Amino acid sequence: MYPLSSTLENLSKRLAEKGFCRTHHSYAVNFSANDHISYQPSGDGEIRLKMAM
């Protein structure tokens, strides 16, 4: 475990070039691990990630 003293906003900006995108105020997702994205009529969405093997 490595302690990290940064906000998710700053971290996601630094990782954007690596394929990460902030999807929620508490989450950032690496889109290379994305399996499927679906959207609801309300505008909410769901991201399904690939299974790690």
Image (cartoon, rainbow, N blue to C red):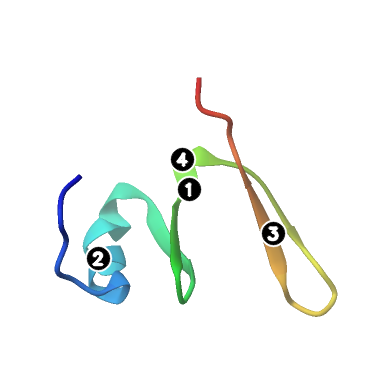
CB-based contact (under 8 Å), mark 2 and mark 4 = no
Which numbered marker is on residue 32? 4
Residue at the farthest front position: 1
Amino acid tagged 1: Phe
Quadrant for residue 44, please give it. Answer: bottom right
Which of the two discs, 2 and 4, labels the residue nearer the N terminus? 2
Residue 39 coordinates in the image, percent (x, y): 76, 64
Q: Nearer the viewer, mark 3 or mark 1?
A: 3
Q: Residue at x 74, y 77 (%)?
A: 43
Residue 26 coordinates in the image, percent (x, y): 45, 71
Amino acid tagged 2: Leu
Which residue is label 2 attached to?
A: 11
Which of the two discs, 3 and 4, labels the residue nearer the N terminus? 4
CB-based contact (under 8 Å), mark 4 and mark 1 = yes
CB-based contact (under 8 Å), mark 1 and mark 2 = no
Which residue is label 3 attached to?
A: 46
Q: Is residue 16 above or below residue 43?
A: above
Q: Residues within 10 Å of mark 2 (few under 14, many from 20)?
A: some
Q: Is residue 14 above or below residue 44?
A: above
Marks 2 and 4, how far apart at CA:
17 Å
Residue at the farthest right position: 41
Which residue is label 1 attached to?
A: 31
Q: Nearer the viewer, mark 3 or mark 4?
A: 3
Marks 3 and 1, how far apart at CA:
13 Å
Helix, strand or loop at label 4? It is helix
